[in-house]
Image (tube, grey):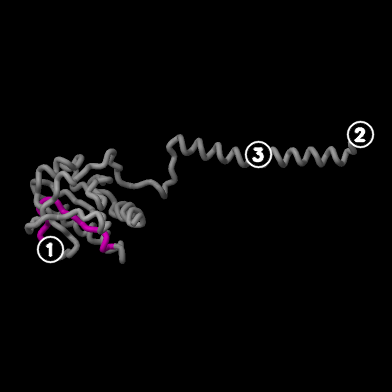
Amino acid sequence: MTVPAQDSARTGRGRLVLIGLFVLFFGSALGAGMLRFSGWMPAGLKNHGELLQPPVDLRQHPPQLAGGGHYAWEPEARTWRILAVAPAAGCGADCAQVLEQLDKVWRLFGHKADHVDVLWLGAPPPDAERLRVLHVLQDDAALRGALPRSADPAGIPLYVVDPNGFVILRYRPGTDPGHLRTDVARLLKLR
């Protein structure tokens, strides 16, 4: 029994379509697996700050407010913190500039700003009392020592602290405040 030429061409086309679908499905899965295991990540999913591995546990060093009293972590409130560490020797214009940037970042959170506290470790600049969101902490050597590279000669490092009191991100001095805002805004969505 002979197969007509038309059926043979149709069978060949069917095989090519089947092979094409196979390559399309398994090829994309193979490509995605290669990207995943090579460490590649889309730019929109990368954080701008340095991810601290392991996170630093600040629950062992409970901060005290400069005006007296204790700053409680209160994990059930789901409040994220931005911690600025001023140089122990004091600072001038750099502190005022960082404080202004932190105030702007905090305001840009809009209705979610109530879920972000800005903490300042060390002596604040003279006009710091105008910011109602700022919590000035007493300078504590143990707290400074717990933070990685807090005595940065380049300026004021910033840290992101989760609601439980773990430091998860560090930003080097002079970091673009927009990067800090982007990362914290992404974290606020986890509420």
Marks 2/3: CA–CA distance: 30 Å
Rendering coords of residue 78 (x, y %): 27, 57
Q: Secondary structure at mark 3?
A: helix
- Residues in magenta? 113-127
Between label 1 and label 3, give the one nearer the viewer: 3
Residue in view at x 24 percent, y 54 percent: 75
Looking at the rendered image, the quarter that the C terminus falls into is: bottom left
Q: Residue 22 shows which numbered tag?
A: 3
Residue type pointed to by label 3: Phe
Asked whether residue 168 is in view, the answer is yes
Q: Is residue 153 visible?
A: no
Return the mark for residue 105: none
Left-right relation of 9 to 146:
right
Q: Alpha-carbon neighbours of circle 3 within 10 Å: few (<14), some, or many (≥20)?
A: few
In magenta stretch: residue 114? yes
Percent of width and height locating residue 103: 22, 61
- Say which label, 2 or 3, has the lower sequence index: 2
Q: Which residue is mark 1?
A: 129
**Residue at (63% x, 41% y) in the render:** 24
Task: Residue lying at the far front in this picture: please name it.
Answer: 76
Q: CA distance from mark 1 to mark 2?
A: 95 Å
**Quadrant where the image shows the N terminus:** top right
Between 113 and 165, the one lying in front of the other is 165
The residue type indicated by label 2 comes to Thr
**Residue 2 numbered mark, or none:** 2
